[in-house]
Image (cartoon, helix red, strand yellow):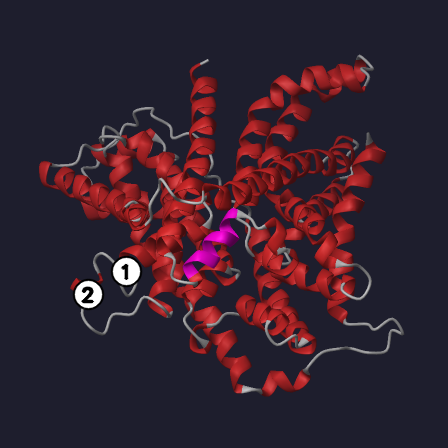
């Protein structure tokens, strides 16, 4: 098992090493750097870097600020109508493919959008406003769930003591709520910042021009439109240095737990007054409406197409391709994550903590390099050696699998460590073989594995960055088809395809929540 784990770790590392080798830009003789150093003093480069940082910082700040009153409303009012459905919608909004949201926002706030006439003649979705709206929509649900879980960790004794001391609303906020939120606020801000900094599809679709371009989109344009490899390499290295440094910093702060079932246990909290309860209901209803509007805006688009004569085959094949890629990549990522954790488990049970930490870092190292950076590195390396038009889809699957492994590792690792802590000595004393050990471990790990698989499936279905580099028109995925429809202003077809993809994602989330609830009730 130890050898299998090391082989899995080596397999995962190989892609990153090869991508770095491609990024270094050696031409085979090992003497050519391939970097366009003149770009570093160019005004375009500075504007791209500045805009990447600015939009990510604003998006993260807005998401955290707007999430706070919603999390408080959910915490203080556990009896809110359709509360569980709202939290399921939060999961769906965070993990669903971004092209669905983009299509909905264009239908709602675009040039011919449903509510655009009320926004004034100067309103323009494309550019910074559209990017901020999309990023806030995608990350607000995540921030709500994280802050709600942090509030739910406040011990009942704190509230009882506050009641005995007759603390007012402001004092409870300052002395009890804020310390509970503050502990994870920097980490939450950093995580959302990195997500927005590495955002590709949102900026590609809503950027609207060179003034609103991020590093990821600039890399894509340099490679696909201009075929300027030195410029793409320079941009990719810049992206890697900034995003990688931020991730390493975040990794030291720990990880945020959010993908769990909401605790319906009634906490002992001060009962809000009637006015505050009405405010909580208003905040809750506004947040629910804001999350639902871009999805509901897809429905009128159906009226633009004749569904009876619609070419369903045109979206059926991309839908099947998307499901096939997601299923293979998700299954592979789960197995790979399980295997890559084996070396650190053995090292930890043998008391070699430093080696265990090294293995832990290696198993999640793919988070350091954004998908676009790894894709560009491998593309440059493989282009003169392999017919990528023929084998490109294989790399779409493999890269999707490898790049989502860290998310599966973060879901599986706590449960595996808990198992080792409780049963490892017993398993060793009984000298159980691989199959016997698996029979004991699987029932313990089944819930975490199914949760992780659902997350992997959704992440793989939403990929656009890897497909934009390695994908081919013969095997178009549903998100890329939606991008093509939206890019040619065929909003009716884009709405149909988006709704289909949304239904698939909603079904996965519903199955996941149904399973979680069943496990909780058991």
Q: Please say whether residue 162 is one of the residues in the magenta stretch.
A: no
* Residue 470 vertical placement versus 50 (above, below): above
As rendered, which of 53 and 301 lies closer to the eye?
Answer: 301
Tell me if residue 479 is in the magenta stretch. Answer: yes
Which residue shows up at 65% across the image and 43% down it? Answer: 405
Residue 20 location (% of width, % of height) = 74, 63
Quadrant for the N terminus in the image: top right
Q: Residue most toward the front?
A: 309
Which sits earlier in the primary sequence, circle 1 or circle 2?
A: 1
- Horizontal side of 317 relative to 98 (left or right) equals right
- Could you tell me which residue is drawn at 74 percent across and 15 percent down? 426
Can residue 82 be seen by looking at this rendering? yes
Tell which of 512 and 256 is nearer to you.
512
Magenta stretch: helix, strand or loop mostly: helix
Residue 12 position in % (x across, y down): 74, 47
Element under label 1?
helix
Read off the residue under disc 1: 109
Instruction: Give how far across and how far down residue 373 sits, in percent.
Output: 64, 62
Mark 1 and mark 2 in contact? Answer it, CB < 8 Å: yes
Q: Secondary structure at mark 2?
A: helix
The image shows residue 310 at horizontal and vertical percentages of 40, 44
Query: What span is colored magenta in the figure?
Result: 478-486
Q: CA distance from mark 1 to mark 2?
A: 9 Å
Image disc number at residue 296: none
Mark 2 lies on residue: 119
């Amino acid at each position: 098992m130890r050898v299998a784990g090391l082989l899995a770790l080596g397999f995962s590392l190989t892609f990153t090493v090869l991508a770095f080798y491609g990024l270094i830009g050696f031409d085979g003789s090992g003497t050519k750097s391939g970097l366009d150093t003149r770009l570093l003093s160019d005004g375009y480069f500075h504007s791209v870097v500045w805009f990447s940082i600015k939009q990510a910082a604003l998006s993260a700040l807005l998401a955290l600020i707007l999430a706070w009153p919603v999390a408080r409303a959910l915490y203080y009012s556990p009896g809110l109508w359709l509360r569980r459905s709202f939290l399921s919608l939060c999961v769906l909004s965070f993990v669903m493919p971004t092209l669905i949201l983009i299509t909905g926002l264009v239908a709602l706030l675009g040039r011919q959008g449903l509510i655009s006439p009320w926004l004034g003649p100067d309103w323009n979705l494309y550019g910074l406003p559209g990017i901020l709206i999309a990023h806030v929509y995608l990350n607000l649900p995540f921030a709500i769930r994280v802050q709600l879980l942090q509030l739910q960790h406040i011990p009942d004794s704190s509230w009882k003591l506050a009641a005995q001391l007759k603390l007012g609303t402001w004092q409870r906020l300052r002395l009890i709520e804020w310390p509970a939120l503050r502990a994870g606020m920097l980490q939450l801000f950093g995580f959302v910042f990195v997500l927005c900094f590495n955002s590709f599809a949102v900026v590609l679709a809503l950027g609207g021009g060179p003034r609103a371009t991020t590093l990821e989109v600039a890399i894509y344009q340099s490679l696909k439109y201009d075929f300027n490899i030195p410029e793409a390499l320079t941009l990719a290295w810049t992206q890697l240095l900034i995003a990688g440094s931020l991730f390493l910093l975040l990794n030291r702060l720990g990880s945020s737990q959010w993908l769990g079932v909401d605790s319906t246990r009634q906490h002992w909290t001060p009962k809000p007054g009637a006015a505050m309860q009405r405010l909580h209901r208003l905040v809750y209803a506004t947040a629910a409406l804001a999350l639902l509007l871009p999805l509901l805006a897809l429905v009128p688009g159906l009226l633009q197409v004749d569904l009876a004569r619609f070419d369903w085959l045109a979206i059926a094949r991309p839908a099947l391709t998307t499901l096939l890629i997601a299923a293979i990549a998700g299954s592979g990522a789960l197995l790979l994550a399980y295997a890559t954790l084996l070396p650190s488990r053995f090292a930890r049970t043998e008391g070699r903590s430093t080696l265990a930490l090294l293995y832990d870092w290696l198993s999640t190292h793919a988070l350091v390099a954004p998908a676009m950076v790894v894709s560009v590195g491998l593309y440059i390396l493989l282009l003169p050696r392999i017919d990528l038009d023929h084998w490109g889809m294989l790399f779409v699957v493999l890269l999707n699998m490898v790049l989502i492994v860290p998310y599966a590792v973060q879901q599986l690792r706590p449960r595996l460590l808990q198992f080792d802590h409780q049963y490892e000595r017993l398993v060793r004393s009984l000298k159980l073989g691989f199959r016997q050990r698996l029979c004991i471990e699987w029932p313990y790990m089944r819930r975490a594995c199914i949760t992780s698989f659902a997350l992997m499936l959704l992440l793989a279905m939403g990929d656009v960055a890897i497909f934009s580099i390695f994908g081919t028109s013969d095997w178009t995925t549903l998100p890329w088809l939606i991008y093509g429809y939206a890019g040619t202003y065929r909003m009716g077809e884009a709405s149909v395809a988006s709704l289909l993809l949304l239904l698939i994602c909603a079904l996965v989330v519903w199955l996941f929540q149904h399973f979680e609830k069943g496990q909780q009730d058991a």
